[in-house]
Amino acid sequence: MTEQLKQKLNDSAVLRWSVLALVAFTMLCGYFLTDVMSPLKPMLEKELLWDSLDYGFFTSAYGWFNVFLLMLIFGGIILDKMGVRFTGMGACLLMVFGCGLKYYAISTTFPEGAMLFGFKMQVTLAALGYAIFGVGVEIAGITVSKIIVKWFKGKEMALAMGLEMATARIGTTLAMVLTVPLADFFGYTDEGGAFHTNIPAPILFCLVMLCVGTIAFFIYTFYDKKLDASLDAEGLEPEEPFRMKDIVYIITNKGFWLIALLCVLFYSAVFPFIKYAADLMVQKYHVDPKLAGTIPGLLPIGAIILTPLFGSLYDRIGKGATLMVIGSVMLIFVHSMFALPILNVWWFATVIMIVLGFAFSLVPSAMWPSVPKIIPEKQLGTAYALIFWVQNWGLMGVPLLIGWVLNSYCKGPVVDGAQTYDYTLPMTIFAMFGVLALIVALMLKAENKKKGYGLEEANIQK
Ligand SMILES: NCCCC[C@H](NC(=O)[C@@H](N)CCCCN)C(=O)O
């Protein structure tokens, strides 16, 4: 019976992939809310009178609690101590609560001049909601990574990770493509005949999606319980207990730091870029604001197809460190093209965005499955949490830096009531992150050669 149960849970491909679909859907909902404000930036400035600094401050809130209150690290410890069910449900509830607060802030008209912590009341409250959500979605991310290891260990782990990332990217795509049409659809025309978009509408839609994502995770917990029961019955400990010395082992490992550094540098040039990409399309490539999210929307769409493909390539052929180097080179090329004052036409932006889609798939599909080659499996939860923590410094700081740079050095004339910006400097900064990422990727390749981590070897052993 036990053997049958184990067979049914661990070895049933249908169950394994179904379980992945459930938790990946939860991540899809989380990624939707993460990026839902990006295509709204011009409208936030026009309708709610935010400026780029407000937007940068709000966007940086994603990492506040994760970075300064060490919530991610605590999340990793809680994950290792309390398990995936408790931590995952807690993370989902945080996402719902944070999104609810953000919706309240955006849908409320506060008295003129009302300030909180030096920023407009609305901006600060929305940022607080986003900060709480940020804790939830990041902890959900490490929880789902641990769930994948739990179900796919010794099986198609890299492919499963690639598919989970691909599913999550559908959430980013929805944010890019659906947000403005939703805000327009629920918009209204005032007595003066002026049309106003409904900015809270897409956030409310996200709130509903997050509730559905939470239900999906809740359903998953029953399968997780069954899996634990089967592992228990086998006499296997379902999850490794957390030990303080695990952290010391991880942080004294050079390979770990190279991965963490590559992660923060690479992702700093991608996720914060996405926050400004729609605005870049309007400002530099003169794309209609209504369609501005469509071109950046290609980025996650490309990644949806390519991430599992490259993951499976890494599984079969190896060359993980090389893939990371190639991805970093592409990143430099892309941001340099966006920075240069050439071909300011939509089709060129589209081609460049597709190239970025390749880079955005190459590095993550090789980097995340490389972590288990550097860090022993029993320390993986904590290691992922620490990498996410380092990465969150970038996710928090870079949007704020870009918002500040835009506000301070890149302002152009006001056209039709809308502020214009020159994106040359911000794009040069993103390109510099690419250069640093390339240096670290090369160092990782050298370290791999020295220590024999096996990053260039196939994951599937013949
Ligand atoms: N198995 C590891 C999956 C990591 C996926 C990775 N996510 C992150 O790096 C998050 N810390 C940040 C997510 C921000 C979402 N806009 C990814 O590539 O998505």
Image (cartoon, grey):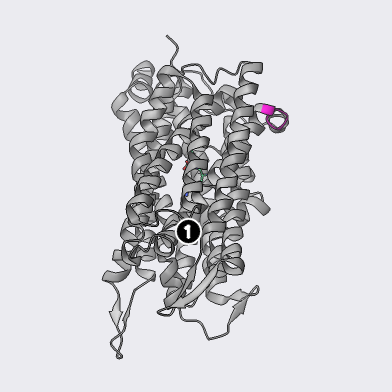
Q: Is residue 371 magenta?
A: no
Find residue 84 and report its horizontal and vertical position in percent: 50, 38
- Identify whether 415 is placed above or below 165: below
Q: Is residue 283 visible?
A: yes
Q: Which residues are magenta?
A: 250-254
The residue drawn where x is 37% and y is 64% is 286
Count all numbered tags in the image, as a single digit: 1
Find residue 458 and report its horizontal and vertical position in percent: 46, 17
Find residue 96 and report its horizontal and vertical position in percent: 45, 58
Horizontal relation, residue 195 to residue 78: left or right: left
Question: What residue does disc 1 label?
Answer: 276
Quarter occupied by residue 287? bottom left
Ligand 1 within 8 A of label 1's CB? no
Which sits in the foreground, 209 or 114? 114
Q: Is residue 86 visible?
A: no
Amino acid type indicated by mark 1: Tyr
For the C terminus, which image quadrant? top left
Horizontal relation, residue 252 to residue 387: left or right: right
The residue drawn where x is 73% and y is 31% is 248
- Identify whether 91 is placed above or below 48: above
